[in-house]
Image (cartoon, grey):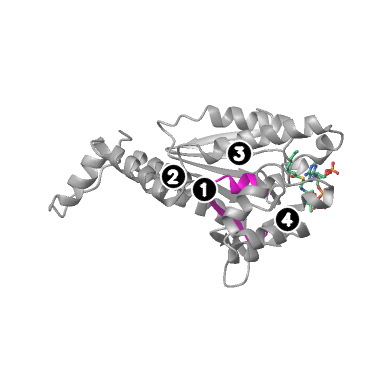
């Protein structure tokens, strides 16, 4: 792959958009490679995916403006569909996905982060939907997901003004769950950069998720995602079905038997994903 790096460590995988010289902007090739990499994830082994960008400056600075600049209406729509299809695949991937936002998350970058289940960022992160300043609309899900995440009023303000927001503001409005700052010693020397802390935090979070019963975690993701799109009466039926599906799995039997076992010396074994 030219623009996507993929690395597995136990049951956690890290996917890095690797086009640093263009601040990891998404051109057709990046989108294609992102799609192929997602398709190839071994979901029997990997229990949580982290998506990040190469370098300390940018997560993804948007869709590639050079590539978009000469598109016709039809080509623009097709490009939008290409991004939407990949991002929807990420959103509906059976396992949880964490966006580790290490800098600019603009336009398609903010939209990529929003297709992930959880967003955490470094203190230098900047979020925004600058599209109307370029004469287009957010076209990789931004007009839909931002309002669902931060509320309609704030989403409309961000999109209509095209103004970027910093990490602290993104945290305040609920666009990210956590902001990671650099660690310094008593003399003020940086001992860990914000990006190092970010990746450490993301990996810890991913490992915590990966330790839980995988079928149950997947069913939670499905129940939350599908339930949010349905009226409450249907949403609770979705929940009931996915709740029921966990019973008779080996992990459910083991998880409950472990709790009920009164032997205080016991050590919990890993869940089997069965
Ligand atoms: N596309 C292409 N190249 C980019 C992009 C981008 N989105 N962002 C940065 N680059 C390139 C720059 O052109 C530059 O390349 P070069 O060195 O060859 O000149 C390199 O990355 C470094 O960038 P800068 O020199 O500009 O770095 P600065 O630190 O000065 O600025 C910024 C960083 C503020 C992030 C600045 O690069 C910037 O404003 N980038 C554009 C941000 C933006 O507007 N993003 C939204 C794009 S639109 C979008 O994402 C729409 C998604 C939906 C598409 C739907 C299709 C129908």
Measured Cα–Cα span from mark 2 to mark 3 = 16 Å
Q: What residue did someone put label 2 on?
A: 221
Residue drawn at the location 54% of the way across and 28% of the way down: 39
Could you tell which of marks 3 and 4 lies nearer the N-terminus? 3
Measured Cα–Cα span from mark 1 to mark 3 = 11 Å
Position of 98 relative to 40 (above/below) = below
Q: Which residues are magenta?
A: 110-124
Q: CB atoms at circles 2 and 1 under 8 Å apart?
A: yes
Residue drawn at the location 34% of the way across and 41% of the way down: 242
User: Whole-percent x and y of residue 45?
Assistant: 41, 32
Measured Cα–Cα span from mark 3 to mark 4 = 19 Å
Q: Is residue 21 left or right of residue 191?
A: right
Q: Is mark 4 within 8 Å of ligand 1?
A: no
Q: What residue did someone put label 4 on?
A: 159
Q: What residue did someone put label 3 on?
A: 87
**In which quadrant will I find the C terminus?**
top left
State which mark lies toward you, 3 or 4.
4
Asked which secondary structure carries label 3, the reply is helix
Measured Cα–Cα span from mark 1 to mark 4 = 21 Å
State which mark lies toward you, 1 or 4.
4
Position of 56 relative to 92 (above/below) = below
Can residue 175 be seen in the rendering of this structure? Answer: no
Q: Nearer the viewer, residue 28 or 205?
A: 28
Q: What residue did someone put label 1 on?
A: 117
Residue 114 included in the magenta stretch of the image: yes
CA neighbours of label 2 inside 10 A, class few (<14), some (14 to 19), many (20+): some
View extreme (right): residue: 70
Could you tell which of marks 1 and 4 lies nearer the N-terminus? 1
């Amino acid at each position: 792959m030219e623009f996507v790096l993929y690395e597995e460590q136990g049951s956690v995988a890290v996917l890095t958009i690797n086009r640093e010289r263009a601040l990891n902007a998404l051109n057709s090739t990046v989108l294609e490679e992102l799609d192929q990499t997602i398709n190839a994830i071994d979901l029997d082994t990997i229990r949580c995916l982290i998506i990040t960008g190469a370098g300390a400056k940018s997560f993804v600075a948007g869709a590639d403006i050079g590539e978009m600049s000469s598109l016709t209406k039809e080509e623009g729509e097709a490009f939008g569909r290409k991004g939407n299809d990949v991002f929807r695949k990420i959103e509906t991937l059976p396992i949880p996905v964490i966006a580790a936002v290490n800098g600019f998350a603009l336009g398609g970058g903010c939209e990529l982060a929003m297709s992930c289940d959880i967003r955490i960022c470094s203190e230098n992160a900047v979020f925004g939907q600058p599209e109307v300043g370029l004469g287009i609309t957010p076209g990789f899900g931004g007009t839909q997901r931002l309002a669902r995440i931060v509320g309609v009023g704030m989403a409309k303000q961000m999109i209509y003004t095209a103004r970027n927001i910093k990490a602290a503001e993104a945290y305040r409005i609920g666009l990210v769950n956590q902001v990671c700052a650099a660690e310094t010693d008593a003399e003020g020397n940086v001992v860990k950069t914000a990006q190092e802390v970010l990746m450490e935090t993301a990996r810890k979070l991913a490992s915590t998720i990966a330790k839980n019963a995988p079928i149950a975690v997947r069913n939670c993701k499905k129940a939350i995602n599908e339930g949010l799109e349905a009226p409450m009466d249907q949403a609770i039926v979705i929940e009931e079905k996915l709740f029921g599906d966990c019973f008779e799995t080996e992990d459910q039997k083991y998880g409950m038997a472990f709790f009920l076992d009164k032997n205080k010396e016991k050590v919990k074994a890993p869940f089997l994903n069965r």
